[in-house]
Image (tube, helix red, strand yellow):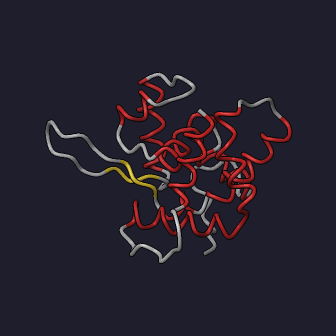
Amino acid sequence: MRCELVGAARSGCPINAAVEAFGDSWSLLVLRDVMFGGRRYFRELLAGSEEGIASNILADRLKRLVNAGLLTREDAGPGRRAAYSLTEASIQLVPVFAQLGEWGLHHRPTTRRLRVRAELLAAGGPELWREFMAELRTIHLGEPAPERDGPSVMERLANAYAAAL
């Protein structure tokens, strides 16, 4: 699909358009925590933030990500928690996250505990990314679960993280 509308973007450059949608570090980290951490609620995202995001920044980024079409927010009734879900557009960022993680592995200092998921995604390559995207579509979009032999990608990522602790 090709979009010819520039809208509020500074230019029609595809890289600029992507950066304006999710390019600030907090937005990427919020998407990471929903995608890889399984965090779907404001309090989970706030409490589970490795980087210590402030509540006002989190609220702003969630609103921006919903407005950009990268997250949906479940309409919760009064007194109920609203769940956030990935959209197809954000699920298609899995290869981008995998590539960013691999770049970070090679060019930035990291800790063993926090690098294991990036290592697993890098080692698994595009086949693992596609499998993970299919799992995310089941969780966030309600698509039927893919057939698989052995543990899911989510389970493998969680197990790798737990083993590194």
Q: Using the image, determine if residue 8 lies above or below residue 43.
A: below
Seen in the image, is 112 located left or right of residue 108?
left
Foreground pick, 109 / 142: 109
Up-down relation of residue 45 to residue 145 (above or below): above
Q: Quadrant of the C terminus?
A: top right
Residue extending farthest left: 78
At 49% from the left and 44% from the top, the residue drawn is: 37
Give the x, y percent position of residue 80. 18, 40
Closer to the camera in the image, 152 or 145: 152
For the view shown, which residue lies furthest in the right direction? 107
* Left or right relative to 98: residue 64: left
Name the residue: 80% across, 29% down: 109
Q: Is the N terminus in the top left, top right, bottom left or bottom right quadrant?
A: bottom right
Looking at the rendering, which quadrant does residue 162 occupy? Answer: top right
Q: Is residue 144 above or below residue 96?
A: below
Residue found 51% across the figure and 69% down from its top: 134
The residue closer to the viewer here, 152 or 53, is 152
Residue at the image point whose x is 58% and y is 68% from the top = 131
The percent coordinates of residue 82 (x first, y second) are 28, 44
How many numbered marks are there? 0
Q: Residue 147 placed where, x, y %?
A: 48, 77
Residue 61 in the figure: left or right of residue 22: left
